[in-house]
Image: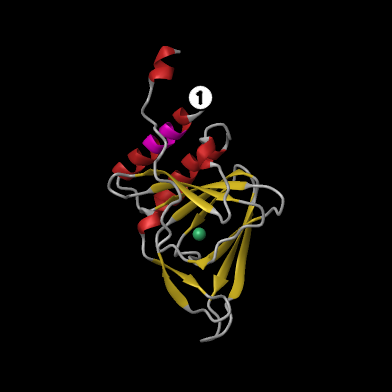
């Protein structure tokens, strides 16, 4: 199995998990297991969803029709990083290529600098959760200054359309943030002609 068949199978399994009424705890265990399976092999991400740009890019790979979850390819050019941000929904981050570093950011004194907390370095094949139960505010960066890194993220909603916040690490001040997506079209999972011809 390779290529989009692998992504399609993952999305089908995630959809079945959503249909079963999974709450956050099951997403962060059973969903994490599914994502671990997806990022165990790096042979399926379309090249156009792996292109780096002048800032980090988020390519939507799939959004559940009722926005119960989404799947996004995050592409980090050399040295690129996010602003300090929150999510407001559960998330799963699976490392596909290269490595990234996530640093929790905790509120400091009112009007004062935020403080770094837990630091996670992800290597290919590893999956970590994001949850309000652990920490919801972090900054993520490419661990490498000389190559692209790519991680596959799942969230408990249509993350590009969720009203969230970015934070000034010097003051803790929040401002509204809706990330959107870089791509205008999602991968076509449903052209089975080559599989059927094989
Ligand atoms: Fe994040």
Q: Name the residue nearer the viewer: 86 or 54.
A: 54
Secondary structure that dominates the magenta span? helix
| Residue at the outermost bottom position | 110
In percent of width and height, residue 121 lies at 64, 55
Query: What residue appears at the point 45 percent right and 28 percent down from the top-left corner?
Result: 5
Where 142 falls versus 152 (above or below)?
A: below
- For the record, the magenta segment spans 7-12
Is 83 in the magenta? no
In percent of width and height, residue 27 lies at 41, 49
Q: Which residue does the numbered mark 1 point to in the structure image?
A: 1
Q: In what quadrant of the picture does the C terminus appear?
A: top left
Q: Is mark 1 within 8 Å of ligand 1?
A: no
Relative to 111, 163 lies left or right? left
Quadrant hosting residue 42: top right
Q: Label 1's element?
A: loop
The 10 Å Cα crowd at callout 1, few under 14, some 14 to 19, many 20 or more, is few
Quadrant hosting residue 96: top right
């Amino acid at each position: 199995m390779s290529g989009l068949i692998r992504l399609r199978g993952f999305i089908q399994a995630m959809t079945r998990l959503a249909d079963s009424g999974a709450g956050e705890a099951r997403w962060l265990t059973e969903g994490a297991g599914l994502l671990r399976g997806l990022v165990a092999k790096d042979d399926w991400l379309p090249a156009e969803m792996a292109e780096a740009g002048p800032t980090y890019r988020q390519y939507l790979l799939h959004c559940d029709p009722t926005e119960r979850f989404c799947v996004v390819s995050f592409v980090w050019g050399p040295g690129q990083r996010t602003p300090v941000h929150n999510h407001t929904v559960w998330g799963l981050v699976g490392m596909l290529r290269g490595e990234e570093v996530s640093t929790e950011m905790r509120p400091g004194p009112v009007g004062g600098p935020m403080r770094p907390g837990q630091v996670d370095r992800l290597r290919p094949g590893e999956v970590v959760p994001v949850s309000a139960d652990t920490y919801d505010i972090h900054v993520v960066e490419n661990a490498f200054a000389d190559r692209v890194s790519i991680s596959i993220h799942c969230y408990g909603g249509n993350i590009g359309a969720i009203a969230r916040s970015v934070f000034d690490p010097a003051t803790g001040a929040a401002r509204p943030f809706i990330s959107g997506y870089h791509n205008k079209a999602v991968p076509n999972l449903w052209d089975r002609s080559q599989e059927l011809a094989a």
